[in-house]
Image (cartoon, rainbow, N blue to C red):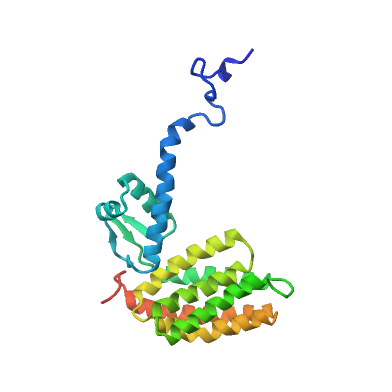
């Protein structure tokens, strides 16, 4: 005979868990499942818009206009905002609303610190050559895309190609979690580049260095690739941090 604590609270019900049993109360969460799935898709759309600069840093996101354009409820949109806030792409300001986050110079230095930890570690742990051919092909494709964008003077495409280069390098680790971490870090870094007025200045000089890292990997020289990457990231941090500091100044917002 069942203990009273194990008896379903609904007489004759089938599949209703007893109070305290695993799964108890989940029926009340059913309605939230569809909304959560939709919120993630809305977050994907907004994340892409932020990445391309459609919503620049410091801009306010209107619940009414975005919700109306996407045809989603206020609750769903707010959940999407929460997801992107956890990713440090948005910030909620009390009684003012939700804004695309403006990265501080301290944030920028920390972003580069994380990049150096991750990207250099990936190259250090590659093991013995030959390395993954498909992974190297992705790195090469990003290098070629950057060089083509530079020739075509397509500066936003150049920026995108450079981001993809670093993502491809990290993908050589074969770790889904590491790739997810780097996607979040690089998405935050893009907020910095959207503030800067001249993307060519911050990406074109590194095309040669991207190719040098690629060639070191193609030759099987991971230690050289790591050395090149460490120098690359430190030079980039110094250059970008100084320029970004001048751009945002002490007011915490981009200067005109």
Relative to 85, is 185 on the left or the right? right
The image position of residue 60, as x and y in percent, is 28, 60
**Res. 89 in view:** no
The answer to whether residue 10 is above or below residue 44 is above
Q: In which quarter of the image is residue 216?
A: bottom right
Relative to 15, is 27 on the left or the right? left
The answer to whether residue 32 is above or below residue 51 is above
Task: Locate the N terminus by quadrant.
Answer: top right
Q: Nearer the viewer, residue 67 or 210?
A: 67
Residue drawn at x 33%, y 74% as measured from the top left? 248
**Res. 155 in view:** yes
The image position of residue 148, as x and y in percent, is 47, 83
Task: Locate the C terminus by quadrant.
Answer: bottom left
Residue drawn at x 40%, y 81% as measured from the top left? 154
The image position of residue 27, as x and y in percent, is 46, 31
Residue drawn at x 40%, y 80% as measured from the top left? 155
Q: Which of 175 and 192 is in front in this view?
A: 175
The image position of residue 58, as x and y in percent, is 30, 65
Task: Please count the marks in the image.
Answer: 0
Looking at the image, which residue sits at the far top? 1
Residue drawn at x 50%, y 19% as measured from the top left? 9
Q: Which of 56 and 110 is in front in this view?
A: 56
């Amino acid at each position: 005979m069942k203990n009273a604590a194990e008896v379903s609270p609904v007489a004759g019900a089938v599949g209703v868990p007893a109070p305290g049993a695993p799964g108890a109360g989940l029926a009340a969460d059913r309605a939230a499942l569809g909304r959560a799935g939709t919120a993630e898709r809305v977050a994907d759309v907004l994340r892409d818009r932020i990445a391309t600069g459609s919503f620049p840093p410091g801009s306010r996101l209107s619940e009414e206009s975005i919700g109306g354009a996407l045809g989603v409820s206020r609750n769903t949109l707010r959940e999407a905002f929460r997801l992107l806030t956890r990713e440090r792409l948005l910030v909620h300001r009390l009684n003012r609303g939700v804004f695309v986050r403006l990265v501080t110079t301290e944030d920028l230095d920390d972003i580069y610190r994380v990049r150096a930890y991750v990207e250099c570690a990936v190259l250090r742990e590659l093991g013995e050559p030959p390395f993954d051919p498909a992974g190297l092909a992705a790195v090469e494709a990003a290098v070629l895309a950057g060089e083509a964008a530079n020739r075509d003077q397509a500066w936003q495409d150049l920026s995108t190609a450079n981001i993809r280069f670093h993502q491809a390098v990290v993908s050589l680790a074969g770790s889904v979690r590491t790739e997810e971490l780097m996607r979040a870090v690089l998405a935050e870094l893009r907020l910095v580049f959207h503030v800067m007025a001249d993307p060519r200045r911050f990406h074109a000089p590194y095309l040669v260095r991207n190719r040098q890292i690629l060639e070191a990997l193609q030759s099987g020289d991971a230690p050289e690739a790591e050395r090149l990457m460490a120098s690359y990231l430190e030079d980039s941090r110094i250059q970008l941090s100084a320029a970004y500091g001048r751009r945002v100044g002490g007011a915490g917002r981009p200067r005109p």
